[in-house]
Image (spheres, rainbow, N blue to C red):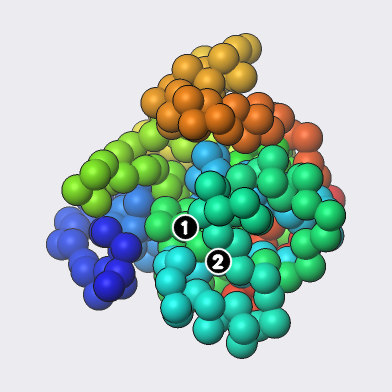
């Protein structure tokens, strides 16, 4: 059975207005939002700060390769065996898991399959529909923005997807840490010279949704660690004993490793 809300055959009917055309930098939430704004996109940027994208960033810093996969079940075990990779488990399982601190502390990593129902599932799904997928967190937001500005054409369409979390019934719970992380990347695009940030709304620049995320990041940046620890997801992790994961997620621009999904595997590119 698929993880709640992750059925790849489920679709929503979206109007043309929901697609954020003709803006070249767009933002939406979750898989349904991703399917809506990735039409014609050159790059999908998946933001899951707590904690998939942060795990990927830490792993790449350590020379590892990461395979995204939606489910932690027999399918994930078969997928890991097929790719000669280690399968990460649940946080309380005692081994490698969806924990940035665990990735940082592991003696060796190599090739890792890292399932999650949000960021990992999004990356796995979008790889079928978008030419290029990147995993972005606060640690590599600036480096990824620099890479985009240096390597993609000025008119490239960038679809930023805030992964969010899930309510107990499986529906999407927008998560402020992902809006902050998405905003860090979008603000970085503007700083790196990706045109249109100040352009008239709706004319090939940044969509209002993207501009709003950048504004949220700019408001949060002066007390970023406090914001991450105080948000619902941060409180949940700290309360379960994983406060170090939140600290690592708050390491703004500590990494220059750009996480690009190539042939189903996140490998490392460097910002120009």
Of residues 170 and 180, the one drawn nearer to the viewer in this rendering: 170
Residue 82 image position (x, y, % from top left): 61, 87
Work out which residue is located at the far front of the displayed protein and give it: 94
- Establish if 123 lies above or below 53: below
Report which quarter residue 66 is drawn in. Answer: bottom right
Residue 79 image position (x, y, % from top left): 55, 81
Of residues 103 and 197, the one drawn nearer to the viewer in this rendering: 103
Report which quarter residue 10 is drawn in. Answer: bottom left
Residue at left offset 83%, top offset 60%:
108
Residue 1 image position (x, y, % from top left): 27, 73
Q: Name which of mark 1 and mark 2 comes first in the sequence.
A: 2
The residue that label 1 is drawn on is 116
Residue contact between numbered discs 1 and 2, judged by CB atoms under 8 Å: yes
Q: State left or right for residue 177 relative to residue 114.
A: left
Work out which residue is located at the far bottom of the displayed protein and give it: 82
Number of numbered markers: 2
Asked if residue 192 shows in the view, the reply is yes
- Establish if 165 lies above or below 254: below
Residue at left offset 46%, top offset 66%:
72
- Establish if 11 lies above or below 54: below
- Can you tell which mark lies on residue 199? none
Of residues 129 and 149, the one drawn nearer to the viewer in this rendering: 129
Of residues 192 and 118, the one drawn nearer to the viewer in this rendering: 118
* Gap in angstroms between the C-alphas marked 1 and 2: 8 Å
The residue that label 2 is drawn on is 68
Report which quarter residue 111 is drawn in. Answer: bottom right
Which type of secondary structure does the marked residue at label 1 adopt?
A: loop
Asked if residue 203 shows in the view, the reply is no
Which type of secondary structure does the marked residue at label 2 adopt?
A: strand
């Amino acid at each position: 059975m698929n993880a709640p809300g992750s059925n790849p055959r489920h679709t929503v009917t979206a109007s043309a207005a929901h697609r954020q055309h003709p803006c070249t930098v767009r933002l939406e939430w979750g898989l349904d939002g991703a399917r809506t704004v990735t039409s014609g996109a050159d790059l999908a940027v998946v933001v899951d700060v707590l904690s998939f994208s942060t795990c990927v960033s830490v792993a790449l810093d350590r020379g590892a390769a990461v395979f995204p996969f939606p489910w932690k079940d027999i399918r994930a075990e078969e997928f890991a065996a097929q790719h000669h990779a280690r399968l990460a488990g649940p946080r309380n399982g005692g081994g490698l898991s969806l924990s940035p601190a665990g990735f940082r502390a592991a003696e060796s990593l190599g090739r890792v399959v890292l399932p999650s129902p949000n960021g990992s599932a999004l990356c796995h799904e979008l790889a079928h529909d978008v030419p290029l997928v990147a995993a972005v967190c606060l640690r590599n937001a600036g480096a990824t923005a620099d890479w985009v500005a240096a390597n993609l054409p000025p008119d490239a369409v960038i679809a930023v997807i805030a992964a969010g979390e899930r309510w107990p019934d499986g529906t999407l719970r927008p998560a402020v840490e992902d809006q902050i992380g998405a905003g860090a990347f979008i603000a970085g695009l503007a700083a790196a010279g990706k045109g249109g940030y100040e352009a008239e709304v709706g004319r090939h620049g940044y969509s209002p949704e993207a501009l709003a995320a950048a504004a949220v990041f700019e408001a949060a940046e002066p007390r970023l660690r406090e914001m991450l620890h105080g948000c619902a997801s941060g409180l949940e992790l700290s309360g379960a004993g994983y406060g170090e994961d939140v600290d690592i997620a708050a390491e703004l621009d500590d990494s220059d490793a750009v996480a690009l999904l190539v042939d189903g595997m996140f490998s490392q590119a460097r910002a120009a």
